[in-house]
Amino acid sequence: MINKGVFMKITREIKKALEKAVDDCGSVFQLSKKLGVSHSTVLFWLNGKTSNMSGDVWYEKVKPILAMENRGAYASGDEASGISNLQKVPVISFANAMGYDPTLEPIDSYAKDCSDELATFMSTKKDGYFALRVEGDSMSPVLPNGSIIYVAGGEFAENGDLVVAKIRDSGQVVVKNYSRNGSDIVLESINPRGKTFKWNTKEQPDYLVWMWPVIEYTVKARRQRWEKNVNKFS
């Protein structure tokens, strides 16, 4: 069962950005020193042996370095460098997400129509992708209230992914860590006070309306530190 925090999916774009950062730094070892992680960790990211990384490692170490190493790509839009222009994505609320009906229209079209806010992300924008503003504290302190997550609408989640899902009975939309063991599914909160959902797909095949993986997220660092301190002393 996942209980160590949010996990960040290593997308093709992130892998390409890592490869470019290796070239810029001169070697995998030099990049690992710059990131403050082990040499083997970076190798596992690059060769696909590890498909997710810790959310804390992504937000606090990897993302700032990739943004710095690839700043020329942002300015030029050079896709050969591994990252094209930053993607602007419509942001919706939990209330918006709860009102979405997948039988009527694609989620990205729905998000565009009901959103008046845009967020920027490194990962490529594809059909079905949208952003969601986190509400509540079930995923704090890693994803405090107000964090914005980039959701790959229409794609299947893999074991260990952070996901957004809509529970059929309650209509509730949740952000949780996803794990699967055969027919047993768990959507788990990071915050021990948050609710965890468990069910068997054979016994309850229609438990969810929809579920999609999160591929990137942004956090207000000050808010995250405050949440960590509150969690430590509560």
Image (cartoon, rainbow, N blue to C red):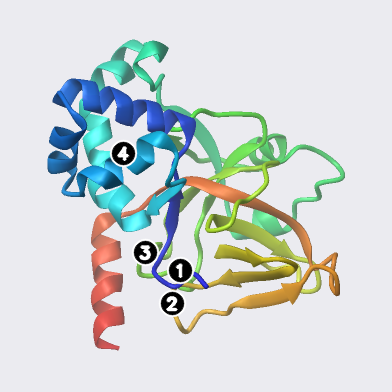
* Marked residue nearer the N-terminal end (2 or 1): 1
User: What's the residue at 24%, 66% (across, down)?
Assistant: 225
Q: Nearer the viewer, mark 3 or mark 4?
A: 4
> Looking at the picture, which amino acid does disc 2 mark?
Asn
Please tell me whether mark 3 sits on a helix, a strand or a loop: loop
* Residue under numbered circle 4: 43
Q: What residue is at 26 percent from the left and 32 percent from the top?
A: 67
Q: Which of the 4 image quadrants contains residue 182?
A: bottom right
Q: Residues within 10 Å of mark 2 (few under 14, many from 20)?
A: some
Across and down, in percent, residue 93 comes to 58, 54
Task: Indicate whether 128 appears above or below 146.
Answer: above
* Badge 2 vs badge 1, beta-carbon distance below 8 Å: yes
Residue 139's tag is: 1
Q: CA distance from mark 4 to mark 1?
A: 29 Å
Disc 3 to disc 4, how far (Cα)? 25 Å
Q: Are marks 1 and 3 in contact (CB under 8 Å)?
A: yes
Q: Amino acid at mark 4?
A: Leu
For label 3, the crowd category at 10 Å Cα-Cα, with few meaning under 14, some 14 to 19 and many 20 or more, is many
- The image's mark for residue 191 is 2
Distance between the Cα atoms at labels 3 and 2?
Answer: 9 Å
Give the alpha-carbon distance from disc 1 to disc 3, as whole Å.
6 Å
Number of on-image labels: 4
